[in-house]
Amino acid sequence: MPILTRPENMERITTSALAQRFIDEQIADIRAQVGGKKVLLALSGGVDSSVVAALLIRAIGKQLVCVHVNHGLLRKGEPEQVIRVFRGEMDANLIYVDAVDRFLDKLAGVSDPETKRKIIGGTFIDVFAEEARKLEDITFLAQGTIWPDILESEQGIKAHHNAGGLPEDLKFELVEPVRILFKDEVRVVGKTLGLPDNMVYRQPFPGPGLGVRCLGAITRDRLEAVRESDAILREEFANAGLAGKVWQYFTIVPDFRSVGIKDGRRVDEWPVILRAVNTRDAMSATVENVPFELLARITDRITHEVKGVNRVLYDLTPKPTGTIEWE
Ligand code: XMP
């Protein structure tokens, strides 16, 4: 039986030797639990689901079926990386679902942030359930539940986001190989399993993805502006050595335009807002003191490389009074 509760005296996994011991134990536990049966996993490409996938591939190979749903709200290069790492390098049984049009069509004209979140979450469950129904002989559902999820749901802080959500006819037994780990331990385990650094040390990314950073009703052109400007910000932060230092950094594109000038002509285009914050627990946050020269360079790149953008702003607001996301 897998261990469901973190033992009080459990040593914090801080080295690859400790991670390797955990990996070996988990592989034995997973094999004992699953036997010759099949396991399904929603693989977002985030840290937790990626580490669970890598562990299960080691333990049961092709008995694991990974489903990666591209909802069109992922960061630049993410779906490609999931396919490259898991199908290409780890030879995983990976189903890639291009659901971009389905999500964006449902979101068209919807400007209320909570309604947007509900549509994104609900459509994700629908798409995943449809894929699950097409498969035969699935007994288990793997999830990237981690120890803080369990603690927070016990304390009533948040509903345990992994469990549940699937319709009644799709009730699987759960496989949760990282449920007794803290986030930093999941990262050490992922690194030891050979996952790339930009997957393992990834900054937090909300479930609704770029959808809550393309403010108001999402349009494809503004969404592209969010994705492209976010990629430039990430690249410049990485080059400046800030990628591992700043807790969360991203771009936002509001749904209004302002006048500007490009090539001697008047243009009405969108602004891009940069946000870079530090926090321990996301309950409060301070703003990163980004060097002015770097801000100027990012501004120059975004205004010249991203279609439809003529201004860049830096959000100087700590939390409170601002939240980290804009909607
Ligand atoms: P706020 O904006 O509330 O964000 O200061 C705090 C942290 O939570 C993330 N966040 C979300 N994560 N689904 C998620 O999975 C969401 O709907 C969501 N909204 C905010 C945010 O990115 C930050 O890390």
Image (cartoon, helix red, strand yellow):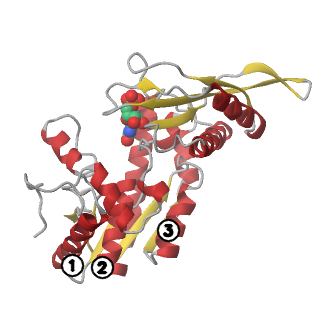
Tell me if label 2 and label 3 are in contact, CB under 8 Å: no
Of residues 60 and 167, the one nearer the viewer is 60
**On the picture, is 2 further left or further right than 70?**
left
Label whose residue precedes the other's in the sequence (2 or 3):
2
Determine the CA span between mark 2 and mark 3. Answer: 17 Å
Q: Assess disc 1: are there few (<14), some (14-19) or many (≥20) residues with their C-alpha within 10 Å of its C-alpha.
A: some
Disc 1 residue type (three-letter): Arg
Disc 2 residue type (three-letter): Ile
Disc 3 residue type (three-letter): Val
Residue 145, image quadrant: bottom left
Does the Cβ of the disc 3 residue fall within 8 Å of ligand 1? no
Considering the numbered disc 1 on the image, is that residue within a helix, a strand or a loop? helix
Give me the disc on residue 31: 1
Rendered location of residue 112, percent (x, y): 47, 27
**On the picture, is 220 further left or further right than 200?**
right
Q: Assess disc 3: are there few (<14), some (14-19) or many (≥20) residues with their C-alpha within 10 Å of its C-alpha.
A: some
Q: Which residue is mark 2?
A: 60
Determine the CA span between mark 2 and mark 1. Answer: 7 Å
Tell me if label 2 and label 1 are in contact, CB under 8 Å: yes
Determine the CA span between mark 3 and mark 1. Answer: 23 Å
Considering the numbered disc 3 on the image, is that residue within a helix, a strand or a loop? helix
Q: Residue furthest bottom?
A: 36
Rendered location of residue 270, percent (x, y): 69, 27
**On the picture, is 295 further left or further right than 99?**
right
Let me know if residue 197 appears in the view. Answer: yes
Label whose residue precedes the other's in the sequence (3 or 1):
1
Q: Which residue is mark 3?
A: 85
